[in-house]
Amino acid sequence: MDMNFVIIGGDAAGMSAASRAKRLDHNLNVTVFEKSMDVSYSACGMPYNIANPDREIDDLVVRRAEVFKEKQGIDLMTGHRVGQIDRHNRWVSGIKSDGKKFKFPYDKLLIATGALPIIPEIPGADLAGVMALKSLDDGRRIKAYLKEKSARSVVIVGMGYIGMEMCEAFRERDMGVSMISMDFLPGFHETIAGMVRRELESNGVMLHVRHQASQIVKAGEILNILFADHGLNADMVLMAIGVTPNSSMAADAGLALGPKKSIAVNRHLQTSDENIFAAGDCSDAFHVVTGQKTWIPLALRANRAGWAVADNVCGKPTEISPVAGTSVFKVFDLQVARTGLSAAEATQFGFEPAEVVIESRSRAHAHPGGSSIWVYMAGDKKSGRLLGVQMVGKEGVAHRINAPAVALHNRMTVDEFSRTDLAYAPPFGPVWDPMLTAANQLLKAL
Ligand SMILES: Cc1cc2nc3c(=O)[nH]c(=O)nc-3n(C[C@H](O)[C@H](O)[C@H](O)COP(=O)(O)OP(=O)(O)OC[C@H]3O[C@@H](n4cnc5c(N)ncnc54)[C@H](O)[C@@H]3O)c2cc1C
């Protein structure tokens, strides 16, 4: 009998695994259960879509459900929420959107349930108009709400990258934006965070840092967000304080958990049950710098892990590479990027870090139109290893971060990185690339 490969969750990790498995072995029965009606969409594109009232949110769908079914032969069951995994009998069960129950057997199972937005437990968090942005349906709801209410103002709770991207989207729609959070860009060095802070303020965003929303009350059509002894009025509240792994079903099934309650997986993406894999935002990963388990929910890892699971299920043993946490986002005119660890993070893992911050240029000094790039770099005094880099600037930041990311994967020392042959031409940077200037400065501190 042909093998049943069952996948829970039909987005980045789940559909990557399904497509690749079917490509590798056309006789494999691949069944995907997805609780929503959407599969394979770009969540990362939602802030830019929401910024434009004329764009359809469905523009973000990469491949429609029918294509997976008809062209690729994948049994894609949308509107099917899996609620339970029976490891003993090897079946999953759940409930369909019409309320009917279903039960399905598996030989190999992939959990690709992603992450869930964290909603603070404060009075009023369940009011209409208080929303989070995670799924395409969330994006739909937000767009419909903004249109229906002709919303003019929003309070964003949280100051991480999704909060920043959404802040720009709301300003694009000419809305008044206030942000409240205990931390500003957690994980970033104060110089980098300070540049972002000034950019937000110069774009008319009201920031309330080191504050926590304590309650939301409705006064007529207006939401009133209370914190400390202040109150802010807005038409809408966006909860953007972060996400948490969607791992409760795995925990109920007795599977081992890792950092932040993500599903623990080995380098083959197997959970503590060899017939069950986990991939994407619901699962953990090894960190390239520390060698230890970490939880960093990002899109490339989810897609790559989906591929690796398919390889392993189809008899092509594959180990997945560790993560460096390389990420980039845009906020108004700034590009902000990071890879690896900050000194504060590295200290927790037994490193003895030194750090520098330098200001360089995006183009050669005599070349018109350049702007400043600030680079933060951390290295280990004991081993000389490069530990991490952060950067901010108006241009030349987003792709420049990939050079130190590759250096981290190769466990390079700061000295080795400072000797790499990086490209130069006046429109793209100084002769000494900002990466090399930062590395040369850091060498003096190691
Ligand atoms: C607004 C926004 C912007 C982002 N921007 C970036 C970016 O610029 N760069 C980047 O790297 N990452 C970005 N991300 C993160 C990126 O989208 C995620 O890392 C990626 O989608 C993770 O893929 P996944 O398949 O693990 O999980 P998800 O994409 O969350 O998919 C999980 C799927 O599982 C389904 N599911 C969950 N539970 C069940 C169940 N019990 N039964 C059936 N189905 C279930 C869900 O409905 C969902 O479709 C962004 C995320 C958001 C929300």
Image: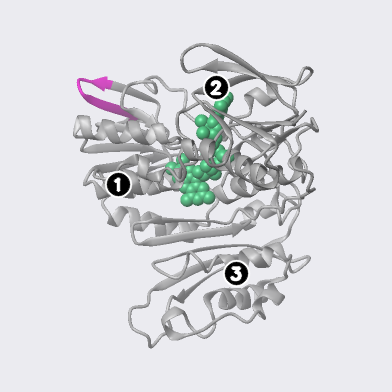
Q: Which mark is residue 403?
A: 3
Q: Main secondary structure of the magenta part?
A: strand
Q: Earlier in the sequence, mark 2 or mark 3?
A: 2
Q: Is residue 135 left or right of residue 246?
A: left
Say what secondary structure mark 3 lies in: helix
Extreme residue in the bottom direction: 366
Q: Amino acid at mark 2?
A: Arg
The question of residue 145 being in magenta is answered with no
- Mark 2 → mark 1, Cα distance in angstroms: 31 Å
Q: Is residue 275 left or right of residue 72?
A: right
Q: Amino acid at mark 3?
A: Ala
The question of residue 221 being in magenta is answered with yes
Say which residue appears at 73% left-offset and 60% top-offset: 352
Q: Is residue 141 left or right of residue 419?
A: left
Say which residue appears at 59% left-offset and 35% top-offset: 74
Mark 3 beta carbon near ligand 1 (under 8 Å): no
Q: Nearer the viewer, residue 414 or 31?
A: 31
Considering only vertical position in the picture, is 46 above or below 106? below
